[in-house]
């Protein structure tokens, strides 16, 4: 993250003696990226964060994953997936490649304790509210929030009721685009959001317990650790690495006299992919402007759009609705549905809300996604199928 935070009690100098009220030392844990060469935080535990009493292999549900062949645009209807028991272990995988995996969950139950040791996660809250509980402290969330969870942070999801989540798991780190930041990490004036829009943990979370299970996803598979003591035992921490939240409703749209390309909507970047936010906004104001996108072919990327609110004008008549996902792959020229261009002329405002993930390597299709595919979508531009 671009700026420093501190919570709880920490010693004046790092890597020095810091004692608990009973005289014993707090256990210091450095969580850092890129081999001690990037952002990090220091956490001070009441108990050893290294003390495990069991390690068991865990096999998550196995999903089919196939290439997008024959190549065609796809429409996945996520609200047909039903509800899941655990919002983490029962994620329904939709799309994936070597850089990221996109999944969906709808659950009202508290998740297991979980650590993703492969990469950062971005959770988008389509609907609902609750609390993300982490070793850094809790974060309250509600509809429209992005939750950025750094690699290896232990967390669990505690819903208030039914919560629908789009999950983006990376094989590296997710953060603001570099062009939005100064060389020292401050958001620049042209950035569509700033430090004031970002929410970090505001209080610590201390929980007692012994023999506590934590599910760990790692590059060799999954393991269920049993920790001697509960990992939510941090008395204080400081640094630049921590989970944080940003509401899509705080993204400030950039508009112009003519239609602006998708990079103006970029919100985050990951390894070989970007995440963009399409929000309600004033649209193009040239006297001859066409507010909906032009036909385009992103030759180096696949485009996934998750429609999460409002009315997305360019997809009118396609069957796209709340909770839909469209996939427009490289090799296919895509654009507005027939009639959308003429209908958009003269519009001054679009009330739409969507999350876009553009990947720079092709996305494969996963079994749960294929099970809710609208197979008529590919032919909605022509109106017929041979």
Image (tube, rainbow, N blue to C red):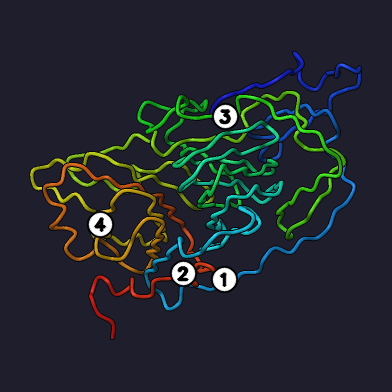
Asked if marks 3 and 4 touch (Cβ < 8 Å), the reply is no
What is the spatial separation of the Cα atoms under label 2 and label 3, in whole angstroms? Answer: 36 Å
List x then y, in percent, for residue 62: 65, 69
Element carrying mark 2: loop
Query: Quadrant of the image for the C terminus?
Result: bottom left
Element carrying mark 1: strand
Residue that protrudes farthest toward the front in the picture = 161
37 sits to left or right of 130: right
Q: Is residue 236 above or below residue 116?
A: above
- Residue receiving disc 1: 65
> From the viewer's perspective, is the residue at label 3 or at label 1 nearer?
3
Q: Which mark is residue 314?
A: 4
Element carrying mark 3: loop
Disc 4 crowd, CA 10 A, few/some/many (<14, 14-19, 20+): many
Disc 1 crowd, CA 10 A, few/some/many (<14, 14-19, 20+): some
What is the spatial separation of the Cα atoms under label 4 and label 1, in whole angstroms? Answer: 29 Å
Q: Residue at x 55, y 58 (%)?
A: 101
> From the viewer's perspective, is the residue at label 2 or at label 3 nearer?
2
Q: Which mark is residue 372?
A: 2
Query: Mark 4 vs mark 2: which is more N-terminal?
Result: 4
Q: Nearer the viewer, residue 15 or 149?
A: 149
Asked if marks 2 and 3 touch (Cβ < 8 Å), the reply is no
> From the viewer's perspective, is the residue at label 4 or at label 2 nearer?
2
What is the spatial separation of the Cα atoms under label 1 and label 2, in whole angstroms? Answer: 14 Å
329 sits to left or right of 130: left
- On the image, which quarter does residue 319 sit in? bottom left
Query: Mark 1 vs mark 2: which is more N-terminal?
Result: 1
> From the viewer's perspective, is the residue at label 1 or at label 2 nearer?
2
Asked if marks 4 and 1 touch (Cβ < 8 Å), the reply is no
Query: Mark 2 vs mark 3: which is more N-terminal?
Result: 3
Q: Which mark is residue 200?
A: 3
Q: Residue at x 79, y 48 (%)?
A: 213
């Amino acid at each position: 993250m671009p700026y420093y935070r501190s919570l709880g009690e920490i010693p004046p100098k790092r890597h020095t003696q810091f004692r608990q009220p009973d005289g014993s030392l707090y256990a210091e844990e450095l969580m850092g990226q890129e081999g001690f060469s990037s952002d990090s935080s220091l956490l001070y535990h009441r108990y050893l964060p290294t003390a495990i009493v069991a390690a068991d292999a865990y096999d998550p549900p196995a999903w089919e994953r196939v290439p997008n062949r024959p190549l065609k645009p796809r429409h996945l209807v996520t609200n047909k997936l039903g509800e899941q028991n655990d919002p983490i272990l029962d994620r329904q995988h939709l799309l994936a490649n070597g850089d990221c995996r996109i999944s969906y969950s709808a659950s009202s139950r508290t998740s297991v304790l979980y650590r993703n040791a492969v990469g950062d996660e971005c959770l988008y809250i389509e609907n609902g509210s609750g609390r993300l509980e982490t070793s850094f402290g809790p974060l309250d969330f509600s509809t429209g929030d992005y939750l950025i969870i750094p690699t290896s942070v232990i967390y669990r999801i505690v819903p208030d009721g039914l919560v629908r989540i789009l999950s983006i798991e990376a094989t590296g780190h997710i953060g603001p685009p570099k062009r939005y930041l100064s060389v020292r990490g401050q958001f620049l004036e042209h950035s569509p959001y700033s430090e004031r829009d970002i929410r970090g943990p505001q209080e610590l979370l201390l929980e007692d317990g012994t023999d506590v299970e934590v599910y760990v996803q790692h590059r060799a598979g999954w393991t269920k650790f049993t920790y001697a003591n509960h990992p939510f035992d941090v008395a204080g921490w400081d640094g630049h690495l921590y989970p944080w939240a940003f509401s899509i409703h705080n993204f400030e749209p950039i508009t112009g006299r003519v239609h602006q390309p998708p990079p103006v909507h970029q919100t985050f970047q990951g390894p070989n992919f970007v995440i963009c936010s399409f929000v309600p906004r004033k649209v193009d104001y040239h006297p001859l402007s066409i507010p909906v996108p032009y036909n385009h072919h992103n030759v180096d990327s696949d485009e996934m759009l998750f429609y999460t609110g409002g009315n997305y004008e360019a997809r009118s008549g396609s069957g796209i609705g709340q909770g839909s996902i469209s996939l427009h792959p490289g090799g296919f020229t895509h654009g507005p549905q027939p009639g959308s261009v003429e209908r958009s002329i003269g519009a001054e405002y679009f009330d739409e809300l969507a999350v876009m993930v553009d990947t720079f390597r092709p996305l494969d299709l996963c079994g749960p996604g294929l099970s809710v595919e609208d197979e008529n979508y590919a032919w909605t531009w022509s109106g017929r199928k041979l």
